[in-house]
Image (cartoon, rainbow, N blue to C red):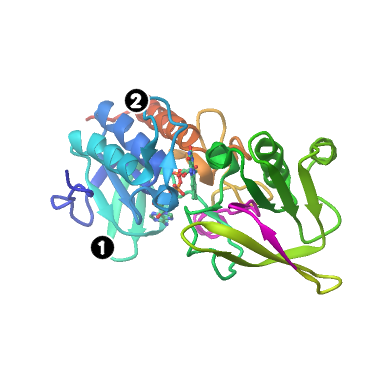
Amino acid sequence: MSLIPRASNVRPGDKFDTIIVGLGPAAYSAALYAARYMLKTLVIGETPGGQLTEAGEVDDYLGLIGVQASEMIKLFNAHVEKYSVPILMDRVESFKREGEEYIVKTKRKGEYRASTIIVAVGTKRRKLNVPGENEFLGRGVSYCSVCDAPLFKNRPVVVVGGGNSALDGAELLSRYATKVYLVHRREEFRAQPIIVKLVKEKPNVEFILNSRVKEIRGDKLVRKVVVENLKTGEVREIEANGIFVEIGFEPPKDFAEVNDLETDEQGYIKVDEWTRTNLPGVFAAGDCTNMWIGFRQVATSTAMGAVAAHSAYNYLNERKGFRG
Ligand SMILES: Cc1cc2nc3c(=O)[nH]c(=O)nc-3n(C[C@H](O)[C@H](O)[C@H](O)COP(=O)(O)OP(=O)(O)OC[C@H]3O[C@@H](n4cnc5c(N)ncnc54)[C@H](O)[C@@H]3O)c2cc1C
């Protein structure tokens, strides 16, 4: 099973019913559904699997019990390959409307034409950028409490952040972990007061405020998190086997701006329940959108990818001249 289906028959200037931008779960799902709707489809993306390339075991996708993320990517890829959907490994820089079609400009391979576009460019999770963070990724460092909380049953953990994701994460982890240390740079929280109150009432959660993580230490796995109090300068070593970095995402602001895609105030692409954006024939799916903020999963992304392909199909069917 090859990881990347070839796009050897695709030439710059070729016209497609739909071009899918991205190569994460949302894009794969959109590609599968588009192919099954018999749309002439091209996927243009950079990293096969998207954020899943950073994940370890995934145990919350129905039917794939305890699957390694790398295996999941291969399965997604094989499923799309079965329908011979071409995948071009490239970065989409921009797209613009000319008459009834879009001209999609890539970084390396040229321009392609499409009647519809499905944007599935995802997000990046914000990092702490401290020593040990990359080294212990998947060995105690996690960016997703919802995904990994059960792995830390009966172990002490640190959660970093002060928004809803961090507080929700601390609440969830308090059900599994022996102890949860919530490290936050400030005294005040951005999270909803009700969830802050709920977490404060948990007997096994300790708040470490006005503090930042300085370093993550361990051997094969995380053993200690070094935290510095920003007011007093005091440094404390916390014994923990997990650290959940819940300090937010980097939305696809620049991509949206270049392509005149309307976003919410944070920079996520605005969509309706059928994944329609503000541009005719342009749909968006997955983590890059303003749908289900605070609950970003493979399941939600693949669901949106399927809906986006369905919407593209309906859009094309409504247009005179589609399929000659
Ligand atoms: C460490 C980690 C562990 C996780 N564990 C789990 C888990 O256990 N269970 C779970 O359900 N979820 C998990 N998630 C979350 C899950 O991976 C994401 O919700 C999901 O990958 C989002 O899919 P997506 O397709 O919307 O975006 P992404 O996965 O972000 O993919 C976006 C894709 O678009 C590409 N791209 C971006 N810009 C361009 C461009 N201009 N041109 C072309 N391509 C572009 C990127 O290279 C990438 O391939 C985890 C995430 C992380 C980081």
Local crowd at mark 1 within 10 Å, few (<14), some, or many (≥20)? some
Q: Is residue 301 left or right of residue 127?
A: left
Residue type at numbered disc 1? Lys
* Precedes in sequence: disc 2 or disc 1: 1
Q: Is residue 178 left or right of residue 218?
A: right
Does the stretch in magenta take in 237? yes
Q: Is residue 20 left or right of residue 266?
A: left
Say which element carries label 1. Answer: loop
Residue type at numbered disc 2? Asn
Residue at x 77% of width, y 44% of height:
205
Say which element carries label 2. Answer: helix
Can residue 20 be seen in the rendering of this structure?
A: yes
Q: Which residue is mark 1?
A: 109
Does the stretch in magenta take in 89? no
Residue at x 71% of width, y 46% of height:
180
Is the C terminus in the top left, top right, bottom left or bottom right quadrant?
Answer: top left
Can residue 190 be seen in the rendering of this structure?
A: no
- Percent x, y for residue 113? 30, 49
Residue at x 33% of width, y 46% of height:
70
Local crowd at mark 2 within 10 Å, few (<14), some, or many (≥20)? few
Q: Which residue is mark 2?
A: 317
- Percent x, y for residue 296? 55, 40
Which quadrant of the figure has residue 305? top left
Residues shaded magenta:
236-259
Residue at x 76% of width, y 41% of height:
204
Disc 1 under 8 Å from ligand 1? The reply is no
Is the N terminus in the top left, top right, bottom left or bottom right quadrant?
Answer: top left
Viewer-side residue, 51 vs 178:
178
- The label number, if any, that marks residue 71 in the structure image: none
In this picture, is 235 found above or below 200?
A: below
Q: Looking at the image, which residue sits at the far bottom?
A: 233
Give how far apart the Cα atoms at labels 2 and 1 are. Answer: 30 Å
